Image (spheres, coloured by chain):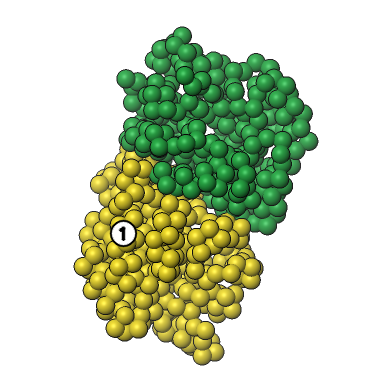
Chain colours: A yellow, B green
Amino acid sequence: MIPEIVAPGGTPAALVAAIDAGADTVYCGFRDATNARNYPGLNFTATDLKEGIAYAHARGRKVNVAINTYASAGNTRLWYNAVDTAAALGADAVIMADIALLDYTTRAHPNLRRHLSVQAGAATVASIEYYYELFGISRMILPRMFTLDEIAELKARAPIEIECFIFGSLSPMTEGRCSLSAYATGRSPNLCGVCSPAEFVRYDTVDGELICRLGDFAINAFGADEAAGYPTVCKGRYSAGEADPAYVFEEPECLNAAEYIGALRRAGICAFKIEGRQRGRFYVAEVVAAFRELIDAEARGEALAQHAGALERLRRLAEGGEETRGAYRKGWR
Amino acid sequence: MTTDSLVLGPVLFHWPAETLRDFYFRIADEADYDTVCLGEVVCSKRTSFFAEALPQVIARLVSAGKEVLLSSLALVSDERELAAMRALAADTSGLVEANDMAVLRELRGRPHAIGPYVNIYNEDALDFLIRQGAVRACLNPELPGTLIADLARLSSIPLEVMVFGRLPLAISARCFHARAEDRTKDGCQFACKADSDGREVRTIEEVPFLAMNGLQTLSHGCANLLGELAPLRAAGVHRFRLSPHSGDMVATATLFRDVLEGRSEPGAATQRLAPLHPDMPFANGFYHAAPGHQFLAPG
């Protein structure tokens, strides 16, 4: 079986671009705190989603709706309504992390496919089994900490589909269990769906260096010849103890696991996820088209080296020009 | 009237086994905690060092009249750790506190506690966990006071809030102490042992920001909710967790008890708390839905 390409639909235009470029599935979210990419100018109204699903279904493709933040006490209705809307509009699956939402969906929409979001932070076969037994999840999106060997073992033991990340921005922290951004800004990504909210980001020039700040903290500094990055706390440059400033948590690099397409497919991965709902439609179309070419070629038994053009395009698109194989190669930990 | 309980959270740092044993002996003999959480929460590689002393420590705490809670790892990430957590869940010598869903699965159907590393942000998630056997829950320290109050109003089990100590902000499969020393996680040589309260992480402008602790990232600021004890109690929270540091945790407990029992004002107690834990500025921003590092004056 050829694994699905699951592409980011940050906007209706990106959804269309991803499908036209060959994505099998697009994932997207509503324009509120119910999804983990709640940034200004992104996401879907109910009408947008209805149109997006119609566009996808007319072409035999799917739309999964991410409702993957945590419902806030006393305000759970906002999240349950999002599930009801996704179900009513014919979404192919909902992607969730909060056990309240998983429980609600299991009861209210038993036939709607439930995917476990990476935001649930489920990191072992046992925790995946917990969600499977209690909420009948069909699929889990694997946290980005697993090695290839562990993925193969997991797939051999877990009775569900496994989707994994193939391209995009990585977090070194367990997703859904990180308060670093909230510590600097007061806004919890788990509750608000925003990590490093734009209203707390500032860029200052000091002695020819561009300093990027989040709230009261300088997260990184860039020389005139460097490409400035966004101030995400876990990808900042800091001094730990006596050492000089360095990327103490993670380099600001982009996962590019194109070379592992075959190994991941053989390990039993059914879907490759591209991160980047904050990305524009041209970026999404280019990444999807490159992976369409590579995944189809691999399925035909061709060596990926014959597709140097697609591999090179991905290298170029990798954030900041630096790419990583993430945890798939041993030694990341 | 519900009585207030002081809970000593698990030691998050890699202290030498003798230091840890003596710390708990002193807690047993001298400190005003009702409950003491034992167990390695951050890194399973540290566990073996203290295993030998653990039964003795439990016995000393229990005979001093303290309840002992056994805390699980916050991130269970392989089969060896899972096997250890299964053994922990099978332990009947005390209530087990689950900090990871993998452990919750093992505890389902019998009484257990929920630790601060399991996400509970709403009453329905809490109810679900109660139906699975949870008998108490310590909330994630990033929760604002309004949300804590909503949860406490709707909860049928006692809720606990972390009121002292560096705040656990993130957990990773990667060890940052090992990375800082250019070592792998497997070959870490226990670099974390050098930092009894975590290793300070400063910004490029030399502003203290975070504290690394192996796989865990903590705040540089130290939670101090002395000024918020009264509204927490009014909201129905009566369990208060203090997270251990190398400063005097016996005297720290006394300061919190004095405020709970009206013998001391939060402002005065804060002034006496600061010298016990030097180089850790106080923080209570999360409670006030402000940036977590801020310290807003009591009142």
The one nearer the camera, A31 or A241, is A31
Q: Position of residue B165 (x, y in %)?
A: 50, 29
Q: Residue at x 33, y 67 (%)?
A: A87
Residue A95 is left or right of residue A174, and the answer is: left
Q: Secondary structure at mark 1?
A: helix
Answer yes or no: is residue B261 visible: yes
> Does residue B208 sit above or below B252 in this rendering?
below
Q: Position of residue B31 (x, y in %)?
A: 62, 18
The three-letter code of the residue at mark 1 reads: Ala
Q: Which chain is mark 1 on?
A: A
B199 relative to A44 in the view: left or right: right
Location of residue B211 in the rendering, given as x and y in whole percent from the top left corner: 50, 38
Q: Residues within 10 Å of mark 1 (few under 14, many from 20)?
A: many
Residue A320 visible in the picture: no
Of residues B35 and A200, the one nearer the viewer is B35
Q: Is residue B239 above or below residue A304?
A: above
Q: B96 or B163, which lies in front?
A: B96
Give the image quarter of residue A74.
top left
What's the residue at 59%, 22% (across, down)? B33
Tag 1 residue = A82
How many labels were placed on the picture? 1
